[in-house]
Image: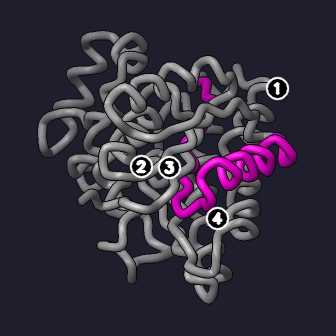
Amino acid sequence: MGLLDGKTALVTGASRGLGRAMAELFASEGAAVAVLDLKEHWAQKVVDEIVEKGGRAIAIGADVSHRDSVREAFRATVQEFGAVDVVVNNAMWNRYEPIADIEPETVQRMLDVGFTGVVWAIQAAAEMMSEKGGSIINIASVSGVLGITNALTYCGVKAAVGGLTRSASVELGARKIRVNSIAPSTVATEGVKTMLSDEAFSDRVNKTPLKRLGEVEDIAQAALWLASDNSSFVTGQTLTVDGGLAHAF
């Protein structure tokens, strides 16, 4: 028996990193998973691995910044699996740069994916989740509450995700739809390891009370708890998964 037996989950930005880890863990815990990313063939690689291990999954190509694309992804999931019980809004497009270098197109793209995409997914979930309700999990960041250099727009978008979470939890509570967010610190994905110098990587480890960066599995396990009935009385919360970093400043 898995924690998500009988449930269907839709995960955005699920072809790699955090999204992939969550999709794979959810499938291993019994969920049917819609693996959503901008390009369907990116998502298909994850689906192939899930199916090879005996799970159920479909790949969906969708641009979360477009409402019609998001709604079609939800419809496809319901058509294939009969329901959408869990939604993880993980997709994000990001660029770190000094304030002086920020360009309009960068701000717009980050808002389109990281903010507007969450709005459209919450809207679609509110319409298409059954009377049994469900769980919406938004991926925020400790950057939304901490001051991070060269991350003005990113910090703003992730802070806004917390506001979306609280508002949606109040409005959708009567529908038995729970809405929470997870705020990770830096996670040791391949992309992060490539982006950070050895010195910067060590600095972030040293600033973290647990003296390591998070792994994708740490965030996926937190998402699993919020997706499962074990957190059935939890809504409107931001679960910080950061090794204690937010308290070390």
Q: Which residue is mark 2?
A: 142
Q: Please, what is the three-letter code of the amino acid marked with disc 2?
A: Val
Q: Please, what is the three-letter code of the amino acid marked with disc 4?
A: Leu
Instruction: Report the mark closest to the observer, 1 or 4.
Output: 4
Label whose residue precedes the other's in the sequence (1 or 2): 1
User: Left or right: 151 with respect to 46?
Assistant: right
Q: Please, what is the three-letter code of the amino acid marked with disc 1?
A: Glu
User: Left or right: 216 with respect to 63?
Assistant: left
How far apart are labels 4 and 3 at the CA level?
11 Å
Label whose residue precedes the other's in the sequence (2 or 4): 2
Q: Which residue is mark 4?
A: 164
How far apart are labels 1 and 2 at the CA level?
24 Å
Instruction: Report the mark closest to the observer, 3 or 2.
Output: 3
Please name the residue shown 46% across and 60% down the image: 7
Image coords of residue 204 (percent x, y): 26, 30
Image coords of residue 164 (percent x, y): 64, 64
Q: Which residues are magenta?
A: 66-95
Label whose residue precedes the other's in the sequence (1 or 4): 1
| Secondary structure state at the residue bearing disc 1 | helix
Q: Which residue is mark 3?
A: 139
Label annotation for residue 105: 1
Label annotation for residue 209: none
| Secondary structure state at the residue bearing disc 3 | strand
- Residue 108: name its quadrant: top right
Instruction: Report the mark closest to the observer, 1 or 3.
Output: 3
Please name the residue shown 46% across and 45% down the image: 143
* Residue 241 seen anywhere in this rendered image of the structure: no
Image coords of residue 83 (percent x, y): 61, 61
Position of residue 6 relative to residue 40, above or below, is below
| Secondary structure state at the residue bearing disc 4 | helix
Count residues near mark 3 (Cα–Cα under 10 Å), then give few for <14, some for 14-19, many for 20+. many
Pick the front one: 244 or 165: 165
